Image (tube, grey):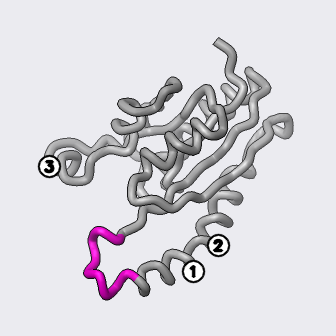
Amino acid sequence: MEIRRIVFATDLSELSFQAWPAALEFARKWNAPLHAVCVIEEPYALAPYEQYGALLRALQEMRPEIEQRLRDRVRDRPPEVVVETAVLESASPAKALVDYAKNLGADLIVTTTHGRGGLSHLLLGSVTERLLRTAPMPVLVVRVHDGAKLE
């Protein structure tokens, strides 16, 4: 198997960045560009119709800050690893990540899981689980270390 392009999926939390070293190592080993991707989940389904405009404006105002945070987080890397960043907006983060990876021709997606279980997992679902079920390319899920905190 040859790895030519890698997608690193993150929500910018400390937990998600525990997969960053693995993504960097694969990118370095295969001399593959690494695409760090964050998906802003559109909250439209959770709000009344009258609030869509306000939510859309808030999302557009947040986007430059999220793009900058992502660029800041991926600066720590070996100089030989090429990293590109992308911030996407979608009601389905997993679908957006899979579509991005497919359009890019990615050979690997690297991510973590927040380890939600029980009712929380049932209600919120899991982006990682959906990636595992729907991505046509391999998905490397890095187990998070105890003591990591959500941002």
Mark closest to the chain's N terminus, 1 or 3: 1
- Tell whether position 48 is magenta: yes
Q: Tag 2's secondary structure?
A: helix
Front residue of 110 and 47: 47
Residue placed farthest to the left in the image?
119
**Mark 2 or 3, closer to the camera:** 2
Q: Is residue 150 left or right of residue 10?
A: left
Q: Tag 1's secondary structure?
A: helix
Q: Is residue 93 above or below residue 137?
A: below
Residue placed farthest to the top in the image?
1
Q: Tag 3's secondary structure?
A: helix
- Contact between marks 1 and 2 (CB within 8 A): the answer is yes
Q: Is residue 55 above or below residue 17?
A: below
Q: Residue at x 42, y 45 (%)?
A: 94
Quarter of the figure that contains the N terminus:
top right
Q: Which residue corresponds to mark 2?
A: 64
- Tell whether position 20 is magenta: no
Front residue of 53 and 7: 53
Q: Which residue corresponds to mark 1?
A: 61
Q: Which residue corresponds to mark 3?
A: 119
Query: The magenta stretch spans which residues?
Result: 44-52
